[in-house]
Every structure is written in C-alpha cells, then in structure tokens.
Amino acid sequence: MTRSLSGFLNPISLLLFTSFACAATVTYDFNITWTKANPDGQFERSVIGINNQWPIPTIRVNIGDQLIVNAYNGLGNVSTALHFHGMFQNGTTNMDGPAGVTQCGIAPGSSFTYNFTVAQPGTYWYHSHVRGQYPDGLRGPFIVNDPNSPFKDQYDEEIVLTLADWYHQLPSTLLKRFISYANPTGAEPVPESALMNDTQGLKIHVEPGKTYMFRVVNMAAFAAQYFWIEGHTMQVIEVDGVYTDPMEASMLYFTAAQRYSFLVTAKNDTKANFAIVAHMDEDLFDAIPAGLNSNVTSWLTYEDNADFPQAKEISVEDLQPFDDFDLVPVDKMELLGEPDQTVSLDMIMDNLSDGANYAFFNGITYVRPKVPTVFTALTSGEMATNPAIYGVNSHAFVLKKDEIVDVVLNNLDPGKHPFHLHGHTFQVIARSQDDEGVYANNVTFPKIPMRRDTVLVRPNGNFVLRFKADNPGIWLFHCHIEWHMASGLSVTMIENPLDLQKSLTIPEDHYKACKEANIPTIGNAAGNTKDLLDLSGANVSPKPIPAGFTTRGIVALVFSILAAFIGLAVISWYGAAPLGASTQVAAEKEIAEAQMEHDIARGINTGSVPVSH
Ligand SMILES: *[C@@H]1O[C@H](CO)[C@@H](O)[C@H](O)[C@H]1NC(C)=O
Ligand SMILES: *[C@@H]1O[C@H](CO)[C@@H](O)[C@H](O)[C@H]1NC(C)=O
Ligand SMILES: *[C@@H]1O[C@H](CO)[C@@H](O)[C@H](O)[C@H]1NC(C)=O
Ligand SMILES: *[C@@H]1O[C@H](CO)[C@@H](O)[C@H](O)[C@H]1NC(C)=O
Ligand SMILES: *[C@@H]1O[C@H](CO)[C@@H](O)[C@H](O)[C@H]1NC(C)=O
Ligand SMILES: *[C@@H]1O[C@H](CO)[C@@H](O)[C@H](O)[C@H]1NC(C)=O
Ligand SMILES: *[C@@H]1O[C@H](CO)[C@@H](O)[C@H](O)[C@H]1NC(C)=O
Ligand SMILES: *[C@@H]1O[C@H](CO)[C@@H](O)[C@H](O)[C@H]1NC(C)=O
Ligand SMILES: *[C@@H]1O[C@H](CO)[C@@H](O)[C@H](O)[C@H]1NC(C)=O
Ligand SMILES: [Cu+2]
C-alpha cells in the first residue's frame, strides 16, 4: 500500500484538506489467486486468496481518500469481480462490482482497476460479486476511519472482528446441486462451521478499564449469527456505516452482510477470561445435519494464564437480540417525504420447468443480461428510461432524479431474508414481526427512522424502505443469502439514467475487460442495437411448469432422459440449463457430475435426502 499526497496544491485537494484531515490516495495491488486453507481445523480446501494469502487483507482508508484497487485475476479457471459493500459510489457506479450489472466479470489473466472516492465513515466489507464466489473466501473487512467521529473520545482502541459461515465444498459444486431438479424444495446448503476472524478460539487481549470499539462484520454466505459477550454489555454506535445514538445491547443479530460497531468497557479488576459467542441462526437451515456445531467462541482475554471457559449454553427462548428498528441516527435525519414511486415486491420460491427451485419477485427470477446493465443504460439514448430494454429477467425499475422511492417487500415465504440495496442507505420505516402477511398500509412511521444498507424481513412478513434517488447509477436490490442471489432473488434499480449518460465516464480498462471476456458493451439486454425493444436472444429463465404438470412429473421426465442418454444428451441438457453450466469445463467432468446428480436423484426416490418446508 502506498499513500501518496500528490496534487495537494490544486484547489479541490485544498477543499478536501479542510473538510477531511488528509485526503490521500490509497492503492492496493491485488493478485487474486487460489490458495489453501483450513480455518475450522477440520478440512483443508481451495480458497480464493489475495497475493497468495488467506484471510485476505483488510482495506483501510480515511474518509475522503481516493481508493485504488488494482485487481488482477490470477485464478486461471474462473472470472471474478470485487464489490465494496455499502459504498455509495456516487458518480462511479461502474466501480460497484456486480459482474453483468456495472462491469464485465474480470476474465482469468485480465486486470481491472477500481478507483473511487470514499465519502462515508464506518464499517464495511468487500467481496466478490460473481455468482457463488464470495463463500470461496474472497471477502474481507473494509474500514473507513473518521477523524471527526462523534465517538472518537469515547474509546481507547479499535478491534475489527469478522463473523462467517464456512463450507468444506466449493460453492461451484454446491450450486449445481442446489439449483437442480434433484432439489425441488430449494433446500440450501448448510455450512459446516461458524468462524470468527476466519478461525475458532481466538484470544482477544484487553486491558482492565479500557474501552474498546468493536467493528463487527458478518461476511456469511448464508447464516445469520446471534452474538454476545459473556459478562459484558455493548453500546451500539454504528449500524452499516450510519452513526447512531448509543444504545445498550446484550445480544446482537447479524444477518449476512450486516455490521455493527459498539463500545465495550473492560472490567477494572478481573483475573478471568470471558467467552465471546456467535451462534448461527438454525431457523435458516431446512435440515440440521447430525453433529453440526453452529457455534464459535473467542475470548475476551484479561489473563493468559487463567481459564478459557466454554461458552455457557443458552436456550432458544433466550436468543433475544437487540432490535435494530429502535436505533436513532446521530444526524437525526427525518422521515423523507411522501413517495413519488412505490416499488412493490412480492417474493416467493417456486419450481420451474427444469425441475429446479428458484426465487421470484412478482413472478420474475433474475437472470444476468448478455450486456451488463450499465452499458445498456449508457448506449440507449432516450430509451434508457424504458425498463423493457434491460430485459425481463433483469427486472428493472427506473427511478427519476431525486424522487422519493418506497420499496414495499412482502415475504410470502416462510424463511428469513436479508435484503441489501447497492448505492444507498435506506430508512427502514415499517417492519412486521413473523407471519403478519402482506403490508397493510396502516403503520405509523417513525419520525427519525433507522437507516442501514441491509435489513432482515421476517418469515411471512414485510417491510417498507424509503430512500431518495439522489445517486445516478445502476444498483442491485437483492437477498444477501448467496444461494438466493444465485436462484434469482434480485431486481435492478436504474437510477436517473439520462444524467448517468452525461456524467459517467468508464475508463478504458473496463472496456478492455469486457473485450477479453468476449462480452458486448452496447445495445439492449440481448445485445441488439437496432431495435432496442427487440429482446430476442436475451438470457431468460426456464419456463414455468405447464398447467396440469406436477413438479414430480418433470423430475421424473428429466430423470428418465438422464437415465436413457447418459452421455451426449446429458451434455446438451446441461448446455440448455439456465445460467449456463461453464462451457470451459470438460465434457468428461460434466458427465461425472451428472452421474453424481443422478445418484442424488435416486436418493430422493428413496427418501434419504432431507426434503423440507
Ligand atoms: C499472481 O500470482 C500468481 C501465483 O503466485 C503468479 O503466477 C502470477 O505471476 C501473479 N501475477 C501477477 C500479475 O502478479
Ligand atoms: C478452479 O481451481 C481451483 C483450484 O485449483 C479448484 O479447486 C476449483 O475446483 C476449480 N474450479 C472450477 C470451476 O474448475
Ligand atoms: C482515479 O480517478 C481519478 C478521478 O477520476 C483520476 O484523477 C485518477 O487518475 C484515477 N487513477 C487511476 C489510477 O486510475
Ligand atoms: C481480525 O482480523 C482482522 C483482519 O483480518 C484484523 O485486523 C484484526 O486485528 C483481527 N482481530 C483480532 C481481534 O484479532
Ligand atoms: C473502574 O475504575 C474507574 C477509575 O477508577 C472508575 O471510574 C469506574 O467506575 C470503574 N468501573 C467499574 C465498572 O467499576
Ligand atoms: C450452541 O449454542 C447454543 C446456544 O447457546 C446451544 O443451545 C447449543 O447447544 C450449542 N451447540 C453446541 C454443539 O455446543
Ligand atoms: C416446488 O417448490 C415448492 C416451493 O418452494 C416446494 O415446496 C415444493 O416441494 C416443490 N414441488 C415439488 C413437487 O417438489
Ligand atoms: C393493520 O391491518 C392489519 C390487517 O388488516 C391488522 O391485522 C392490524 O391490526 C392493523 N394494525 C393497525 C396498527 O391498525
Ligand atoms: C451524490 O452526490 C450528489 C451531488 O453531490 C448529492 O446531491 C447526493 O446527495 C449524493 N448521493 C449520495 C447517496 O451520496
Ligand atoms: Cu434470501
């Protein structure tokens, strides 16, 4: 990392200099490569590291800094991309990271520079935004120091701590089984372990009487975690980058992708050590594998020679986390005015005609377009405000400059889901408890709502979010359970595309990355340039199940095709599969995998695979 202080004498730098202590350029050179790791001590696997190291580095900048990440894809066999979770990317939507949305995936052997101004303080993280990839390990903390933090005088030291779930198998393998006719209920892969700071049994040294600011990030693919520190309370002061009035909590709940900062004051006089416990929310798991330990313990360590006690077991009824809805932002931003546009989203899970289970908003499951959405927006002139050109399965909503937008989400599914909006924090103005059904439009909104960038919807419940469309760009709104993202639980917000056409300049290396990956950068979602409303050739989802046909019938059909033509027919079936099995993979491997799936299908027939819901 280099900190350069060049350009100090131009007027803009001087301006920055007065509002921020010192606006520097912070550069990271990342060679993204496969390496090996065994963080739970049970199984060594391939993981994605950076510069041959794993865990990957923490990105640290000061507010106002220009961050440059030179990313080289040294993986050899898969493309990649980096998303900086929670960054507004105001004026730089093309630096946001989701492949197929704001950039092309970086092909093996290609490089790509992320370059943006960090305008927000707080606790963030960065991760791959290529289908199924961040559970491979390509995720790490991203911390923005703020010399003017309202809490700067209230703590002595800062402690960064990550939570994660961990799988022994690669997501590429898990996804093939998850989105398959052999898994028609959509039972998600269950992680093997929980991790804290990518390990277990971490000793965190503290000194009596000192106050620590913990910055905790849940980088999980799937599991939310309950979190507590035995014998200590936490004063919450930041949620997803938003400072809050301090609120005391004895237990926190982190969905995938959420963050909290909180103050913990060490005891004055103690010779004991205290368990720091994270417990994965088992409600999320359709079936709990025998022997699963959903807990991970670290220790607040006062005395190295004292005991490191086992975490005290607590009952399910005592899992009573702090309610983030009650938080009040320090800036006291009031409830935004009445909405100009309401985006209503009803979510369900269902099976399609390939027999696999998908996730839907308003009957549409997300499929990545042929042309990354940002390029469609930039090359479509006045047509950019017509959602149709982005393709049915991008599920685009066009937002007008500075309008107030409500997102009303009705969860018609019995699961919990953490939703994340790119490019914004939102006010959480209504949120139901479990089983309250669809939003009834009779809620009194808080005067000063809580704001964050990732929020949980309860099973068969709802929420309402509000934000101002003051950030031109292309922003995904999606479930942060990586499995659900892969099964299509996403929509695309096209925010003020006409301004974007005037203001956004995409650097040459971003176009080069597209060229190297053979991805077009002009035209509608299908790459058509003459008639932008002609979506023929666009990527679409499999068709719905025809009326009168049961899913089991479809499964039986697919199964018999497999049994009869294991060989070429299998390859073509895979070739026709939605979202494309990798064409880089040798046919032999496909057949081997088909045979494995075939075995799983047989397992279902004999009832030996957990079937849920
Ligand atoms: C990235 O790392 C790989 C593996 O160590 C190495 O072979 C390659 O030369 C590196 N590439 C760059 C651009 O640093
Ligand atoms: C890519 O390479 C890694 C490391 O060798 C391997 O574990 C993984 O299975 C490969 N992935 C694919 C999709 O071939
Ligand atoms: C990063 O972006 C800034 C602002 O557009 C530009 O001045 C600078 O040259 C860029 N740096 C790199 C390394 O691309
Ligand atoms: C946890 O890991 C991060 C970076 O990966 C590191 O900065 C931090 O110090 C670690 N925390 C503890 C308590 O060891
Ligand atoms: C710890 O000691 C300090 C300084 O003597 C005192 O102000 C504080 O109240 C004590 N804290 C506790 C928890 O006893
Ligand atoms: C994990 O923690 C929970 C909550 O304390 C407890 O109920 C459960 O028994 C623990 N599981 C194991 C394997 O220790
Ligand atoms: C199809 O999907 C639903 C909803 O996820 C699931 O409950 C059901 O079991 C599936 N149908 C069959 C026949 O497996
Ligand atoms: C809002 O409407 C729902 C459904 O009609 C009802 O169950 C609930 O009690 C109402 N809540 C309030 C605060 O009026
Ligand atoms: C983006 O920048 C514009 C212009 O400075 C500002 O009005 C707007 O509030 C910013 N939006 C966000 C989300 O930061
Ligand atoms: Cu979800």
Image (cartoon, rainbow, N blue to C red):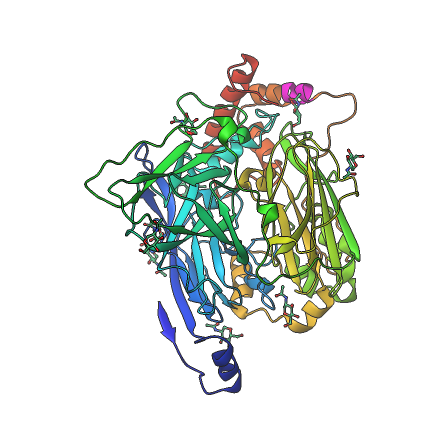
Q: For the stretch drawn in magenta, what is the main secondary structure?
A: helix
Q: Residue furthest top?
A: 606
Q: Residue at x 68, y 65 (%)?
A: 470
| Residue 554 part of the magenta segment | yes
Q: Is residue 318 left or right of residue 396?
A: left
Q: Residue at x 73, y 33 (%)?
A: 437
Q: Percent from the top left, x then y, of residue 390?
A: 72, 54
| Residue 161 part of the magenta segment | no
Q: Residue furthest left?
A: 305
Tell me how many marks there are.
0
Q: Considering only vertical position in the picture, is 378 above or below 75?
A: below
Q: Percent from the top left, x then y, of residue 485?
A: 59, 42
Q: Is residue 397 left or right of residue 557?
A: right
Can the viewer see residue 403 in this picture? yes
Which of the pair 207/600 is nearer the observer?
207
Q: Considering only vertical position in the picture, is 510 above or below 281?
A: below
Classify the position of the C terminus by image quarter. top right
Q: Considering only vertical position in the picture, is 85 above or below 17?
A: above
Which of the pair 79/82 is nearer the observer?
82
Q: Residue at x 74, y 65 (%)?
A: 401
Q: Is residue 30 left or right of residue 426?
A: left
Can the viewer see residue 399 in this picture? no
Magenta range: 551-557
Classify the position of the N terminus by image quarter. bottom left
Q: Percent from the top left, x then y, of residue 255?
A: 53, 42
Q: Percent from the top left, x then y, of residue 143?
A: 44, 59
Q: Is residue 401 left or right of residue 212?
A: right
Which of the pair 430/165 is nearer the observer?
430
Q: Considering only vertical position in the picture, is 64 above or below 239?
A: below
Which quarter of the frame holds ligand 2?
top left
